[in-house]
Image (spheres, grey):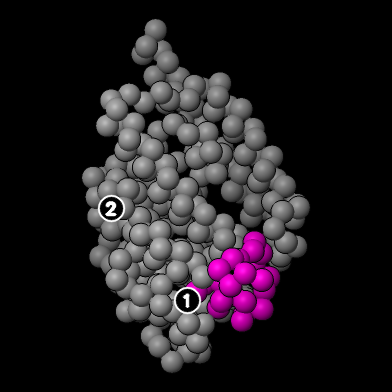
Amino acid sequence: MNSESIFHGAMKPEEEHRRDICVVGRWIKEHGFAASTDGNISVRLGPNRILVTPTRMSKGMMAPDDLVVTDLTGRRLGGLRQASSELGMHLMIYRLRPEVNAVCHAHPPYATGFAVAGMALDKPLLCEMVMDLGCVPLAHYGTPGTSELAEAIEPLVPGHDAILMANHGVVTCGYDLLTAFQRMETTEHFAHVAFVSELLGRQNLLTAADLEKLEARRVRHVAREAAGTEHDSAHAEYPNDAAADRVTLTRRELESLIDEAIQKDRAHR
């Protein structure tokens, strides 16, 4: 196995999860998604065990033994270091989203620029973005390292896999760690494209018909994941009705985009 590659899947030995988190930490550092000791990563090890990055340590310099194991209340179960000061945000996501097994938080510059400007990434510009994330909403500001941060994003967590945090950064989640990281990449790529299109002074939005087709494709994709045909068989650990709820939330999100596109179409007639 390439020491700098990881594979999809949530059911892995703890040793492999530790290695994967360190690899993703290096990716976050190399991509410029986090400066100094910023950012945090976690994976779900079991029903009541979370593996999380330590506080005050560069994500690009971690070793497997530096990681910390906690329970869902934040009590340390293993590790010599202290868990990330933003562990509470991760734990809240795991409690609200039983199908989520990994969370990434970082400060990618373009997406964070939108968060600092108080702007959500909610325009239907890229088909890939609509397919994977729908849109990325903006949560109000919460002080890092306090309960305010989790409280700020909590209303948005059930319906979104990526969230901008005002004047802070981005948090993404997924069925497994690779998915969570890729959603961070997708969010930053979309923010970069949106920024360039703003500079060019023109944004050609997807039409309502385009969005309806993408909605149908995304529903089929989520259904395949719920049936366990992608990544690995770990989906069987979680009830299918949890995945069905996500489809409903995603449909509402995309319907909102469709309504926006229809209104814009009418405005240009």
In the rendered image, which quarter is residue 19 located in? bottom right
Residue 9 falls within the magenta-colored stretch: yes
Most extreme residue toward the bottom is: 80
| Residue type, numbered disc 2 | Ala
- The magenta stretch is 1-22
Q: Which residue is drawn at 24% across and 50% down?
A: 116
**Disc 2 secondary structure class:** loop
* Residue 45 location (% of width, % of height): 60, 76
| Residue type, numbered disc 1 | Val
**Disc 1 secondary structure class:** strand
Q: Is residue 264 above or below residue 64?
A: above
Residue at numbered disc 1? 52
The quarter in which the N terminus is drawn is bottom right
Q: Which residue is drawn at 50% across and 87% down?
A: 65
Q: How far apart are marks 2 and 1 (CA)?
A: 23 Å
Residue 157: tell me if it is visible.
no
Going by the image, does 74 lie left or right of 195?
right
Q: Which mark is residue 166?
A: 2
* Residue 5 location (% of width, % of height): 59, 66
